[in-house]
Image (cartoon, grey):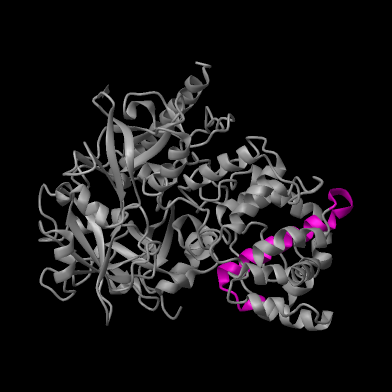
Amino acid sequence: MAAKGREINVEVKMHNRTCFMKVDTKETTLEILKRIADKFGISHPAEFCIMVPSVMDVDGTPMWMDHNSTLNSVYLADGGVLQVKRHPQVLNVFRADCVPIADYVKTFDPDQKGKFTFKADFNDSPLDLVPLWKTVEGLVQKDVQYVFMCVIKPPSGPKTSFFVNSQKSLYEQKIPDDGNIVLYPFSQFMKLTAEQLAATQPELSGYLIKSSIKNDRQTPTKRRWCVLKDHFLYYFKGSSGSPSGVIPLEFYGAYQESDDPLTLRLVANQFDKNNMLMAEAKGAFLLKFESQKQFEEWFPIISQHCSNYAGKDVFGLSLSILMARKSSWFSDVPEIAYKTFNFLSHEMDSEGLFRLSGLTSQVDLYRNMWNMGIAVDYEKEKTDPHTVASLFKKWLREMPDPLLTHERYSDFVQLFGKTEREKLDKFPKLLNSLPTANKKMVMELNAFAYKISEKSEINKMTAKNLAIVFGPNLLQTQDMNQMAADSAAINDVTEFMIAHHPTILNAMTPFKFAKKSTFQGNSKGSSFGSGSAAQKGKGQNHSQARGLTMGNTRGMNSPRTNTQSSSSSPVLPPVRPSAPPSHSAGHPPVRPPTHAKTPPALPPTHAPAPVLPPIQGGQAGGASVKELRRRLEEEERRSDELERRIEILENILRERGEL
């Protein structure tokens, strides 16, 4: 740094984490990001940038800083806030008046009057951006409730449109850069007839038994014709005419009733009614299915639009989407892989690990819980290791693009029959050519498989046996006949990759792992890594892995109130209840969809006393009234969280009949 500027204290916010630090106003943004990355343990600071919410740009939106700019370019007061975001993209926002959808899309012009242009982190959801949109004069009409629609006008060809789920990130919904989001009045949906919906090829339609819950009172059940289209469930008295009502599923949570597996409860989220959300999103609905077959047909499709599933599912998604989520910013692998590796690192003596199948009902239960955003604690639930291994293989198998990618399939398969020297020469080059997220995930998985194979005399899982179970999940082509013909090559190549992991890893182009990587890995060997280093530090590495599973870092995405102190203060880990509190609609608790009898793990009945972050810039005695008030509010929020935990525990005990 050439010269020092003004030194100020700042509060840094990055997703669900916060830290306090001193910065020099002449430091570049990239220099500040590198120090933030060191505090939070992330390995790729250049992929992020800084937004200053308190400083407005010329267009009236918060200031985004490029990597070469300094805080001297904006006046940030001492104690100001810096938000760490992904690099922004351009988003155009329009407001539609009461015009039929087809007519609006037909006449839509991206250069029309009333266009508002913003810079946005596309890892944010529309719901995250609503507070900003509300501040723009002329964009939102008072007392009008909106939903979000994307309109795409290609250089040639017809325009296309689709409704955007307010709970999911723009990136995950494939909103293009310089994309167009339209705020569309929700009232227009009541004007659509059953005949019009039928002509648009809805996702589902059929008769369901419906009732409503308002003010703790349930209306009589009635058989209604229901149509699922986009994120909306329409219900009619018959299969024609105008709807009796429309349920905006994105603002409801979907839960299977504990005492009636064929009944689905839709519970409204408690959002600010003035936050451009639907006023109709209140109370609850009960949908009873007429058969198990109908339930299995409807529930997966309804739930993917609901708030407790949208943007939380982990199965059937590409690795790039999972790693782009904010919850993955602080790790090199998705949380499901992180928890699998750490749990099974203590179960490596299990005979037939990854070869023997787990309990199907448990695998289905945990799959549903993961897809609801509930990170399963395998150790607390005393889960059978074969169940965890089966679930992990299912996750790999359902990826739309395998870890070694469809694009590189033939390149890897062509290594079959090559000499050992040729394979050792080509393998590192092929792995280096993978996307960064795939490369890190493959090397973590390969390191883990290598350690399992080292105990093959006990667990009977040699590199060859592991290749048989992992190969078809890592190397795939969309031509199943071709895969069958290449089965010997797939197994041979995977076996070689596992057996020669230390040599391959050491030959790869160095790349940096996050500080909180699954096995504290680095470019020259993870803690399940290679050669003598792995052997010399075997006991130490085991204790490190154990610490990740048992210690404060157990919850990979747990929020931290202060990372400045060398000894992190205990904080309340996030609670993701499997059902909403009973007071949501005045009815008994419900559960994630499953027919397994094993109940979800109980949340902890107590937690360590919350410790507030130290006041920056002096002793507590010299703190400002504003700072003391902020700390008091923080303590009150944590107290509310503890009360919520107790309420969830009581609900679960009541469901079990133990209360």
- Above or below for 422 versus 365: below
Query: For the view shown, which residue lies furthest in the right direction?
Result: 457
Give coordinates of residue 222: x percent, y percent: 27, 28
Q: How many marks?
A: 0
Residue nearest the observer in this picture, 253 or 479: 479
Give coordinates of residue 88: x percent, y percent: 34, 70
Residue nearest the observer in this picture, 432 or 306: 306
Residue nearest the observer in this picture, 324 or 86: 324
Question: In the image, is 241 to the left or to the right of 566?
Answer: left
Q: Is residue 527 visible?
A: no
Q: Is residue 318 visible?
A: yes
- Above or below for 484 versus 268: below
Assess whether residue 498 is covered by the magenta stretch: no
Question: In the image, is 352 to the left or to the right of 600?
Answer: right
Question: In the image, is 186 to the left or to the right of 552?
Answer: left
Residue shown at the point (67%, 38%) measured from the top left: 383
- Above or below for 591 versus 476: above
Assess whether residue 443 is covered by the magenta stretch: yes
Location of residue 284 by image quarter: top left
- Which region shows up in magenta? 431-460
Residue shown at the point (19%, 72%) measured from the top left: 58
Give coordinates of residue 169: x percent, y percent: 37, 59
